[in-house]
Image: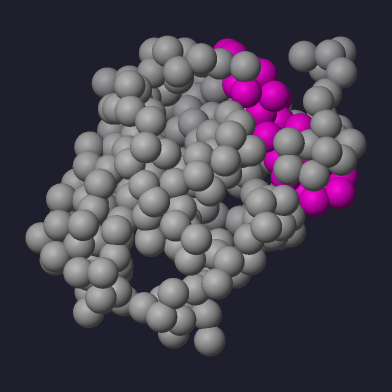
């Protein structure tokens, strides 16, 4: 890998350098004190000199089956215990609190929705909500389900091996005034040239293979003629012109 020419940055096409290598079993739960045994499989990450996007080129070549076999398998719950219930319940409560008054007029898609719990909870709040996940619904074309006024993609961006394909899917599923609300922890202050990749979020065992700086998220939105904004280091949005029901978020 170290002798293979690195591809240009998937976000901005800038030049990339080999940044660091971690063991495949590095997982996010290390932040809570869980350390998996070293697997002895090196995963290299590259870093864009221009926008700060950091990614794992080798895993970008994997198939859906590779990801299912080695990452999103029966052991996944142990290294991401929040994904089954805690995270969808929290996200559903947040959406209902912010947009519940307009639920009847919002068509919602939870992109990368896993077991579909978030959509089920929002349906209980009166939303017209659908869930799509490439591993759960491999035969579904998400574009055919839309267009959607609100698309959520919680803990999705860092998992995808093709960030441009993700943006194409989100864009094709979005209504003209639709909002993409998503979460991914930005890498600013955590990933820097000359510094080891010891950030807890850089965890291949969790499938975290695309790590975004704030600048790289802004450039990615710009490529698709969208505006970009962050509510904090974890929650973000992309939009063109916000609909009335979401205008308060962008004031």
**Identity of the residue furthest to the left in this view:** 124
Q: Residue 152 is drawn in which quadrant?
A: bottom left
Quadrant of the image containing the N terminus: top right
Is 195 on the left or on the right of 132, as rendered? Answer: right
Up-down relation of residue 4 to residue 87 (above or below): above
Q: Report the label total.
A: 0
Q: Which residues are magenta?
A: 40-60
Q: Can residue 208 be spotted in the picture?
A: no
Q: Per the image, is 212 magenta?
A: no
Q: Residue at x 22, y 37 (%)?
A: 115
Q: Residue at x 42, y 23 (%)?
A: 71
Q: Looking at the image, which is closer to me, 66 or 170?
A: 170
Q: Per the image, is 41 magenta?
A: yes
Q: Can residue 204 be spotted in the picture?
A: yes
Colouring convention used in this rendered image of the protein:
one colour
Is 231 on the left or on the right of 107, as rendered? Answer: right
Q: Residue 40 is drawn in which quadrant?
A: top right
Up-down relation of residue 9 to residue 58 (above or below): below
Could you say where residue 137 lies in the image, as x and y percent from the top left?
A: 30, 27
Q: Residue at x 73, y 36 (%)?
A: 10
Q: Looking at the image, which is closer to me, 90 or 246?
A: 246
Up-down relation of residue 64 to residue 168 (above or below): above
Q: Residue at x 21, y 57 (%)?
A: 128
Could you say where residue 142 lies in the image, as x and y percent from the top left?
A: 38, 37
Could you say where residue 234 lies in the image, as x and y percent from the top left?
A: 51, 61
Could you say where residue 81 lies in the image, as x and y percent from the top left?
A: 28, 41
């Amino acid at each position: 890998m170290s002798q293979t020419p690195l591809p240009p940055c998937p976000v901005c096409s800038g030049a990339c350098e080999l940044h660091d290598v971690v063991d495949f079993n590095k997982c996010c739960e290390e932040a809570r004190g869980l350390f998996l045994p070293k697997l002895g499989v090196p995963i290299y990450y590259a870093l864009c000199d221009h926008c700060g996007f950091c990614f794992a080129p080798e895993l970008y070549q994997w198939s859906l089956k590779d990801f299912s076999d080695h990452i999103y398998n029966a052991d996944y719950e142990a290294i991401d215990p929040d994904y089954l219930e805690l995270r969808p319940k929290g996200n559903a409560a947040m959406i209902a609190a912010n947009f519940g008054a307009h639920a009847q007029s919002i068509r919602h898609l939870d992109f990368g929705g896993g077991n579909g719990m978030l959509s089920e909870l929002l349906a209980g709040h009166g939303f017209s909500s659908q869930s799509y996940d490439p591993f759960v619904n491999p035969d579904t074309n998400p574009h055919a389900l839309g267009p959607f006024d609100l698309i959520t993609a919680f803990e999705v961006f860092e998992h995808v091996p093709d960030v441009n394909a993700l943006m194409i899917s989100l864009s094709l599923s979005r209504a003209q005034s639709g909002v993409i609300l998503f979460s991914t922890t930005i890498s600013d202050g955590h990933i820097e040239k000359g510094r080891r990749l010891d950030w807890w979020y850089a965890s291949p065992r969790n499938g975290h293979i695309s790590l975004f700086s704030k600048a790289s998220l802004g450039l990615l939105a710009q490529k698709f003629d969208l505006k970009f904004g962050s509510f904090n280091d974890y929650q973000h949005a992309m939009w063109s012109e916000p609909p009335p029901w979401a205008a308060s978020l962008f004031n």
